[in-house]
Image: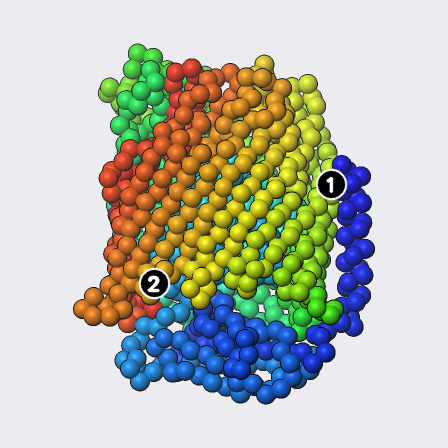
Amino acid sequence: MAKLNQILFKSLLSFLLLFCSMAVSAGEPADNGSIKGKVTTIDNKPAAAVTVMLKGTKKASITDDDGNFMLHNIAAGHYEIEVSLVGYEPLVQTVIVEENKTVYVSLQLKLSQSQLQEVTVSTSLKTYTTNKISESLRLNQELIEVPQNISVATAQTIKDLGAVSSSEIMRTSAGISALGANQDIGISIRGTEMYYSILRNGVGAGYWYNMELDPGMIERAEFIKGPAGYMVSNTEPGGLANFVTKQPTHEKIVAVNFGFGSWNMMRTTVDLGGEFKKGGSLTYRLNAGYQQQDAFYDFGYLKKYYVAGALKFEVDKNTDLSFEYNYVRGHQLSDGHTLQTIDGKRVLPDKFAVVDPNTDGTVSADHYFRFHAKHKLSDNWNLNAQAAYVFGPWGGYMMGINYEPVVNDSLYRQTWLTDWRNRLFTAQAFLDGTFNTGSMEHKVLIGIDYGDNWTRSTGGGDWSGNPALALDITDPVYYLDEAVLKDFDPKDWDNIWGNHYSALYLQYNVKFFKKLIVTLAGRYTSNVTWSNYSDPYVQTDKRVTPRLGLTWMFTDNISAYALYDQAFVPQSGRSFTGQVFNPLTGDDKEIGFKSFWLNKKLSANATAYRVTKNNVLTTDPQHPDFQVQTGQITSKGIEVDINGNLTKGLNIMANYAYTDSRVTKSNDSTQLGLYSYGSAKNMANLFAKYRFSEGLLHGFSIGGGVQYVGKRTYAYDATKMHDQMMPAYTLLEATIGYTLRNFYVNLNAYNLANKKYITNGYAIDDVDYSYNPGEPVNFRIDFGINF
């Protein structure tokens, strides 16, 4: 297989070099030109999802979230562009198209006479769908052309859900759920548990235990199902999430938001943006926020704040330079509220406190620096480069259950100190471009990556079942003396490990007759993993991972695709016998259908897939403090996503996922056929919101939603029972809001039926298990003003 990969990679490289050389002399077909432009409203805001027609032809385009549009392959001549949007005067503008040239136009819509008194306009903030992926994904394609399941949660979707953490955004995409808690976030995609696959503007993969982003910082969330070698070298075959932060803009932005909610929640956010000088080339964006809240369980609390600033300097019309800095800090008592059963029954109230209020709790913070440069080499070729540095601490003096059965009403706890320090440096550069030869359109992507990750963990703990830490569940006593809580060696371990990698990625797309798109790609990665554990080691892994995709465009709005892709993730550590672990490898095979309806205001996508993971690590049944490579986990399933506007004013977000993820090869026969931890066979989400635009209810909005999560397996190891399942649950929610000019207020209520449910759990023995109870009925209200 390795030899086949090398042959594919060399062949791909030869193809790319050939076509890159052809691109120097190739352009649009003779007598063909292009029209590129941007549509804005009277207040200079981008006009999204607007139809742009070329009168007298069948050429048409839909503006993206930034108001941009593109019309290709137009014969030279004089034309009229027609643009229309409800509430605005129709606009017609004359344009002259020349051979082999791109003409640029700027169109601004004017309010119709009947709408002059209406300040609130319909822009990109009212849509749940987009056909545009962020620049950080690097693919110079529209979503409908990409042979892979990629879903996007827009800013409006995030706002309507009332999300106050990035964990709550995960449900906007089929089959994705959050793992962990506010300060230790992971995700489950296609039956794969991942803590290294949450990126920010394409930066990540290797940095963990960072405070999760606040939605106030996020412009959109992109969920990539399956390997994503075009972004980073080391990603799980299940996929990844990419959060795109709010970036500088020429549009003036002044927005303030305040929020209140259950358990004394208070939060405020500020969003500022615009030009330093009117019409100038230097723009900025500044987001800041603070939140404090008690937890639904005794003594629990969360405090967090963030500052996110960015500058963009347009050197000239072809060159942009950007610099961004984020600081996010959180402090929480009991990062993940964990209880346990007694004789297999959930006896303890969900609000019962296991932790002691005198513990320090968990503190996490991260600093994020990113520099990005983009240079337009020509109308069709772009060069991008970015470098990022991310670092931060995570830890504190903490307490939790010690995963032993309750005896004589005594729940035993353990205390520990942990201090994690994480650092990630990464640099990336990529060249992308398009050119035509006859009836074929070619797209090329060439990228290089370098990454260096370093993690240090120090600490110690009391794991002995100290009677002083026992908690009488019938008469609990809290506020223990600090000497009891910290009676252990705080420097019991000091471990450092990390990895650094370099990689080359090449991708070539060719479109035949505007119908068939063939994608050939490959990544070569060289990775060095190292550790200073009690048995230090340095391990080097090299691999070529190919990618092959086919897309058939039935129309500009309907496509079908097939994909084969491979993944490669080096693994750290050694077995009990001192054996270095082989890298985790895997492949993804999927077929899918993508479509846009109702003038691209509604999207409906469906995917069937099979993901295989090899060399998976699990607990060694003979030596529980070590791991072994069990063999293989196979996930197969179906994903369906529907997003957008069903009618004027009615937005909908709906998804369903069937996931069958099990152990298919193992050196422990008792594990064969077991389901992957936390993976629900069935998951579904529905959220809809209707905005009244006429009559007495003009300005009001109302909506609701439902979340369903099926049965899931508790985390387990080979020494414990495997057939315990977390019960399925259904949650109901509702929302109501009102908008008057630039002012808005929204009320969101969650878990309306006050359902008791479990989000995560771990098997303790043959009978008992630990679990994280979900939040009971609660509400949030937020109001704000856009100046």
Q: Position of residue 698 (x, y in %)?
A: 23, 68
Q: With 518 as the anchor, is 591 left or right in this view? A: left
Count of labels shown? 2
| Residue 690 picture quarter | bottom left
Q: With 709 as the anchor, is 375 left or right in this view? A: right
| Residue 513 picture quarter | bottom right
Q: Which mark is residue 647?
A: 2
Residue at x-position 70% and y-position 27%: 580
Q: With 604 as the anchor, is 580 left or right in this view? A: right
Report helix, strand or loop for mark 1.
strand
Q: Position of residue 759 (x, y in %)?
A: 38, 34
CA neighbours of label 1 inside 10 A, class few (<14), some (14 to 19), many (20+)? many
Q: Position of residue 576 (x, y in %)?
A: 65, 19
Residue at x-position 51% and y-position 38%: 637
- State how the image is colored: rainbow
Identified by mark 1, the residue type is Arg
Residue at x-position 50% and y-position 27%: 675
CA neighbours of label 2 inside 10 A, class few (<14), some (14 to 19), many (20+)? few
Q: Farthest residue in the left direction?
A: 696
For marks 1 and 2, give the one nearer the viewer: 2
Dot 1 or dot 2: first in sequence order is 1
Residue at x-position 28% and y-position 72%: 741
Identified by mark 2, the residue type is Thr
In the picture, the quarter occupied by the C terminus is: bottom left
**How far apart are the alpha carbons under marks 1 and 2?**
49 Å
Reading the image, the residue beneath label 1 is 543
> Does any portion of residue 185 appear in the rendered image?
no
Q: Nearer the viewer, residue 102 or 499?
A: 102
* Vertical side of 236 occupied by 199: above or below: below
In the picture, the quarter occupied by the N terminus is: top right
